[in-house]
Image (cartoon, rainbow, N blue to C red):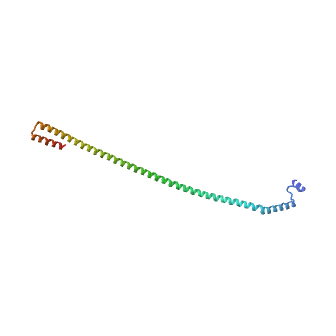
Amino acid sequence: MMMLLLAAGGGGLLSFNGGFAIWVLITMVVFLLIMGKYAVPLIMDALQERESRIKDSLESAEKALSRAEKISKDNEKALREAEQKAQKIRKEAIEEAELIRAERLEKSKEEASDMIAQAKETIEQEKKRALTELRDEVARLAVQSASMIIDAELDEQKNSKLVDNFIKDISKN
């Protein structure tokens, strides 16, 4: 029933009007020609420009990434070199400190040895001076004793023997 109404009424949704279809076809062709001549080239140029900008951006990003990787590798290399230099400097500083310590120890030993030698020499000189003073004192006492004995006894033979024995005793010391 619905079909009959549509076919009989002549203005239904499924009815075909030939004149209207031709106008739709002509306007569509004109629209496509105008679009093809004016709008499509502009859109294509814009798309190509956008594509080239994206390509340039990607290339720039790749270059920046490769530069960043190179810089990172260079930084790692510089860091390793700096660590090696720091270890070398530490090693040299330790060796130098050890050398200075050894030199100071050797110098201290030499100074101690010199002080001991000087003390021994001073002791030896004091000992000789004391012996000399002792001999001088003994000789003075001997002379004094001899002069007392001489005063008391004038026997020359006894005095001579006494002085000889005394000199022998002094020379033994």
Give the farthest residue toward the right: 8
Residue 21 horizontal side relative to residue 57, left or right:
right
Residue 81 horizontal side relative to residue 31, left or right:
left
Q: Is 43 rendered above or below residue 90?
A: below
Residue 167 image position (x, y, % from top left):
16, 43
Residue 57 horizontal side relative to residue 168, left or right:
right
Q: Quadrant of residue 6?
A: bottom right
Image quarter in which the C terminus is found = top left
Residue 84 image position (x, y, % from top left):
48, 54
Give the farthest residue toward the front: 151
Q: Quadrant of residue 150?
A: top left
Q: Is 137 rendered above or below residue 105?
A: above
Which sits in the foreground, 136 or 127? 136
Q: Is 85 rendered above or below residue 124?
A: below
Name the residue at 75% across, 61% down.
Answer: 42
Name the residue at 85% across, 61% down.
Answer: 23
Which sits in the foreground, 37 or 24? 37
Which sits in the foreground, 120 or 131? 131
